[in-house]
Image (cartoon, helix red, strand yellow):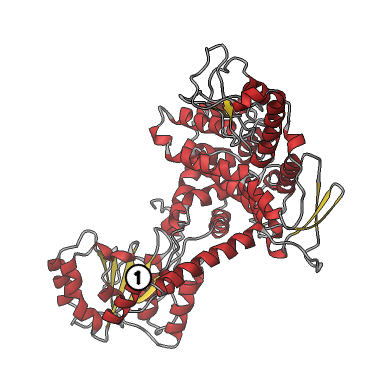
Amino acid sequence: MSYLVLARKWRPKSFAEVVGQQHVLRALINGLDQNRLHHAFLFSGTRGVGKTTLARILAKSLNCEEGVSSTPCGECQSCTEVDNSRFVDLIEVDAASRTKVDDTRELLDNVQYAPSRGRYKVYLIDEVHMLSTSSFNALLKTLEEPPPHVKFLFATTDPQKLPVTILSRCLQFNLRRLDLTQISEHLAFILQQEQIQFETEALTQLARAADGSMRDALSLLDQAIAFGGGDVSSDTVFQMLGSISQDQLITLLQALLQQDGKTLLAQSAELAALGRDFAVVFDLLLTALQQIATLQLVPDMDMPESLSPQLAEMASQFDPEIIQLLYQIALNGKRDLSWAADPQSGFEMTLLRMLSFQPVTPPSPDNGEPTRKKSLSPSKPAVTSPPVTPALSPEVSPTSAREALKQAISNQETDDPAASSAPVSKPPRPASQPEQKPTTQPVLAVNEPEPKSTPASEAVKEAEPVTAETLISVDLSPANWTQIIAELKLSALTRQLAENSALIRTEQHAVHLSLSSELGHLATDKSKQRLQAALSKKVGQELKLVFADPTDNVEAGPTLAVERAEQAAERQQRAIDAIHNDPAVEIIKNTFNARIIEQSIKPVD
């Protein structure tokens, strides 16, 4: 006897043997047992999930010689002929090869005749979405009012292409993809019945490669048995699929965590030597990063039993921001893999990109720009009495710098009245002693060569030793808390924490803050450390952040998030009032009997 492939040998012959699809089975079983049978059924879903199989079992249930039942006997002549695709009253049509309207009309001409042997004449049309528009139109009338002895069973992978007039005449059942557990357990059951040795990890890899399709999984299993010489082992499956083992995946992730570029490139070369498919490696890497991100942000989520404990450990070692960045880089790397010179170089460039975008040293708490030189230098001279424009350090506030500069200039004018009383209209002195009148409005300096010493420039030089620590004295209080937070340059998660934290009080070097319980997930150790470092730098002394218990009823100042929300609400209300008070809008309302939809009003300021 010739060999029968596993997908055909183990095709379910009753509803009890179907894997998954309980939402469809329940409706079909109840309808058969209660004799509430519709005349048209539409089964949709991806390949290999059981559309045609369910249709054949339904046809067998309708024509079993023991009567209509959800449990056909499977032994009568009708049941055996349906199983062997020889039942005369089960007409299977491949719509992909019979798309013309003439084929449909020929089919419908025979609908009026009674079944030859069975109770019902069943038309099973596979890939029904391939029919032409004319074919659908020819089918409409018969589908709406078929003879009592006719049942239509449609199967399709693309129900969106069916006309709504067809959909409205059918009972629609959308079959779902099977999950990894369902597929791997069914494969294990089949191998046990076939008395074939296997490894559980190999079946998991086959189930993942099947992508929710049981038929694909059985076809891959047939291939794995042949490839492994009668056994199904992890090594042979990895080699057949071009995949990698869990240990190799963990090695890649650990090298990324440790920023070990040498190990990453060595792993890439080893995978290339083993003939691994780098697109599959990307899929496994993306899945692992997604699982790590889920463990970090939703720790209470139920994870699959197959999750490696090492991945759970990495979730506490990686920053959530880094995981999100690595996932996006891997996603882009997989997309661009076909454009690379070869798959290995594309994979290696993605790994190197992951290394280059990771901080070599801990990031600055406020992610600030490089500090510019703290110096005051004159700007480019003008035609008439050019002003002296001292440069501002980013850490020096304009008000403090202005007061210091005024004091320096005042002292200079007291020592040398002639320098300050020089008229503007006088012609400029020789280049060695240009006369300049200082200004009281400091602006950013332009990089120009510093002019030779003049009385005014000497006054500016007296202000140079003034540092940010002597000019800035920030007083933390609920009144100015939101302004201080707005001036900090923070990363995304740290900024959310800062904007939603309210100041309770300060005592010595401790800053007491409150954060609502709904936003408690923002207060990660990394975010609190970065906010603490940024505030310490702003104030000029080391501070310690203390977050109050959310259940404590404490009085705190406003948060920047609430303040901005209130400002946005005020702007929105002003915009609404402006629309209502606009005479032109009033004319339009009266002329066209119109009304104002306030939700559509957006402020422009």
Q: Which residue occupies 27% across, 87% down? A: 148
Q: Secondary structure at mark 1?
A: helix
Quick one: which residue is furthest to the right in this view?
508
Asked which quadrant contains residue 104, the reply is bottom left
Q: Is residue 441 left or right of residue 149?
A: right
Count of numbered circles in the view: 1
Position of 464 with respect to 242 (left or right) is: right
Going by the image, does 333 lie left or right of 311?
Answer: left
**Residue 205 position within the rendered picture, expressed as x and y whole percent measured from the top left:** 55, 47
User: Looking at the image, which is closer to me, 110 or 412?
Assistant: 412
Q: Residue at x 56, y 11 (%)?
A: 432
Q: Is residue 352 visible?
A: yes
Say above or below: 376 vs 205: above
The answer to whether one can see residue 19 in this image is: no
Which residue is denoted by mark 1 in the rendering? Answer: 82
Residue found 58% across the figure and 58% down from its top: 181
Residue 370 x, y percent position in the rendering = 62, 31
Q: Amino acid at mark 1?
A: Val
Instruction: Please name whichever residue, 29 or 77, is drawn nearer the observer in this view of the structure.
Output: 29
Q: Residue 309 at what x, y percent from top left?
A: 71, 47
Q: Residue furthest left?
A: 102
Q: Quadrant of residue 55?
A: bottom left
Q: Residues within 10 Å of mark 1 (few under 14, many from 20)?
A: many
x, y percent for residue 427:
48, 19
Quadrant of the rendered image containing residue 132? bottom left
Of 51 and 347, the residue lying toward us? 347
